Amino acid sequence: MKKFLLLIFCFYCVRTYSQQWIISSIAEDGVVLQGGDCNGDGNYIFGACDNGLFGYMNAFAMYVNNDGSYNEIKFDFGSYKSHLCNAIRLEDGNAFVVGVKGGTKQDRLYDTLWIMVMTPNLDVVEEHNYPLVAPYITWTTDVYLEFDNYGDILVLADVSERNYPNVTNGVYAVLKMDIHGNLIKCKYFSEGHGVNGARPTGIIRVPDSDYMMLLGRGFFVNGFHSICYIDNELDKVAAYPLSWLEDNWNYTDYWKDNGHFLMSSMTHHQGGGSSSYYAAVFEVDSQGHYLDTLVYDRADTSDYTAQFGSMAFVDDETIYIATYWENGIDNVSSDAVICLIDKDLNLRGIKKLKMDDTKIRILQCRKTADGGCLVYGQCKKNYGSELLCVWKLLPEDFVILYSLNETPEVLPHHEVYPNPTNDYLNIIIDSENLDYKVIISDLKGLKYFERKFDSATGVLSLDLSSLERGVYFYEVFTGKNCTQKGKFVKN
């Protein structure tokens, strides 16, 4: 194992205590970073090397310190493939790591669930291999981890059957293990068979309960997106369809104490074109009923938005959501959009990630010990070379600060001032409704700020110094009705 110095590009930020950096280096055999967790002193990041022809070939691991220095290691088993999928932090700071391996380097199959306990130095102190049980033939790389209420670890994994080796068809497995990786109990679930595809996308502990909630597709024969509850014996106790949800991917990392959870999702309107895709966060109750939505990113006419393991919960005021633009053409660059929201679905600010001539696909967003986040996935230069990229962001890199003057002494003639603006924008709120919302978005409809208020008339002052130069729109809503709107220029 070699220890590398980090190649850091420092970005100026208005607030001096911001620590924003990026790891960027050439990945000779292509690296896809998919999962990981924070242990306090740094972050574990896991994935695989991708040769582009036969898929993921060799498992890859990093440990990134809070200062940006890092270790990395590649696992090479010769004739068969390996992939590290996810991890969860143990009390001693080590990571419980799950991966898959097996098959041959000429197919896309795996046949063994691979469990390790790994130190920050990337030393393996525990290792177990669990082959698939017939009639199942392959694990995919979609594997999720969560502690249960007794300190054991539940592993939720996608599985395929021998008759459908190359599709995910509603078969999934839940395994209970101790913190050393010893298997306690395993159960396969096989609802929703068929070539339409179905897969679990997450598992989370239910507060004040012995139940665990599974999220994804395949819990019903008709393929609805669903939530499913299992008990301590891994028996299914309830399942509810999310029939209002159209998306293929949905995740949760935050359950509210009042019986509601937040779920991020890349979705689209049925029958629409590419412009109908959008990324959103939904508030859902424990029986799968839709309650509220924050739509924070919409596609334009040529691209669509996409997201995967995109939610990182820090606290009630700091929840990161990551998405990226996808145009489907490998040699065309694309950007990523990272959002900061709170538990009440207020969009507090966004950050765009872009690199010249590079396609950015964010596959994971993970919190850091200082309240920030790491985002990473797969980056590819237009001329073909792969990049290993990890971005570090903090809340102050996102937040649009605001203040509300309830009784302004002097009100200018215009509804917004100054316009153009360099830093602060003042919006005169002339609604007498006590419940209103302010939205700022760009020309493509990408939201940069959305905040709900319960105050009377006044002047809302926004610190827009973190916004890029350009033309933006503001809208003021009372209930569902837009009562004020206009345009302003950020210099």
Image (tube, rainbow, N blue to C red):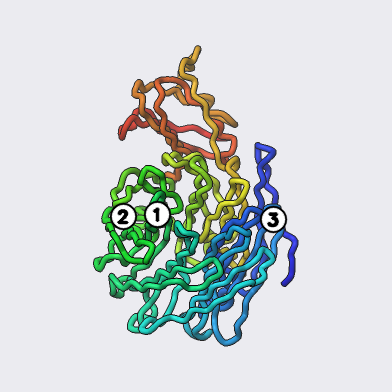
Residue that appears at 27% across and 53% down: 244
Q: Which mark is residue 68?
A: 3
Q: Are marks 2 and 1 in contact (CB under 8 Å)?
A: yes
Image quarter of residue 70:
bottom right
- For the residue labelled by badge 2, is the local secondary structure a helix, a strand or a loop? loop
Q: CA distance from mark 1 to mark 3?
A: 30 Å
Residue 213: x and y in percent read: 37, 58
Left/right placement of residue 141 relative to residue 163 reads: right
Amino acid type of the residue tagged 2 in the rendering: Leu
Location of mark 2 (residue): 245
Q: Are marks 2 and 3 in contact (CB under 8 Å)?
A: no
| Direction left: furthest residue | 222
Image quarter of residue 162:
bottom left
Residue 367: x and y in percent read: 56, 52
Residue that appears at 63% across and 53% down: 40
Amino acid type of the residue tagged 1 in the rendering: Ser
